[in-house]
Amino acid sequence: MFAERRSGVSLRCAVEGPAYEGATNGCVHTIDSSAILDGDRLHVFLTNRSVNESAEVEIKLAGGRCAPVKAPSCSPARMPSGQYLRRRSIVKAQPFKEIRVADGQAVCQLPPLSFAAITLKLT
């Protein structure tokens, strides 16, 4: 999942949206992101930290347009809080079909406690 997305230039992402007060890190966004520009491909990594809420994420490009290439996702099954680290075998890569492109910008729906690695082709 990551080996083919490791080359390129790391980009700074601007995140807007819900946040919460973390016990050790202060104010933390519910959605976290990172991005790598690799030629005409943009690799975007997204995490939804919310335990209960899915999140709509808009990937807006400054002065550019995109088309989806592929987007596998890791998302744990629902289970009681605190069980995730003890049952790592339930976290598996699976197709991420919750992404769409409208007007050259990508939009996706991230389930609670999920991670997505998305590759977009810049047009």
Image (cartoon, helix red, strand yellow):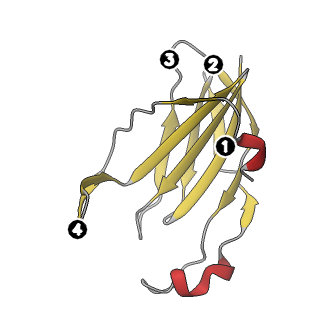
Residue that carries the numbered disc 1 in the rendered image: 118
Q: Which comes before the other along the chain, label 1 or label 4?
A: 4
Q: Looking at the image, is 89 positioned above or below residue 12?
A: below
Instruction: Report helix, strand or loop for mark 4.
Output: loop
Q: Residues within 10 Å of mark 3 (few under 14, many from 20)?
A: few
Q: Tell me the mark number nearer the camera, choosing from 2 and 4.
A: 4
Residue that carries the numbered disc 2 in the rendered image: 65
User: What whole-number distance in Å separates the C-alpha atoms at marks 2 and 3?
Assistant: 9 Å
Q: Residue 115 occupies which quadrant of the picture?
A: bottom right
**Residue 43 place in picture, x, y as percent:** 65, 37
Question: Which residue does the image show at 75% across and 53% down from the upper left?
Answer: 1
Marks 4 and 1: in contact by CB < 8 Å? no
Question: Which residue does the image show at 54% across and 79% down from the upper left?
Answer: 78
Instruction: Report helix, strand or loop for mark 3.
Output: loop
Q: Tell me the mark number nearer the camera, choosing from 1 and 2.
A: 1
User: What whole-number distance in Å separates the C-alpha atoms at marks 4 and 3?
Assistant: 34 Å
User: What whole-number distance in Å separates the C-alpha atoms at marks 1 and 3?
Assistant: 18 Å
Residue that carries the numbered disc 3 in the rendered image: 62
Q: Tell me the mark number nearer the camera, choosing from 2 and 3.
A: 3
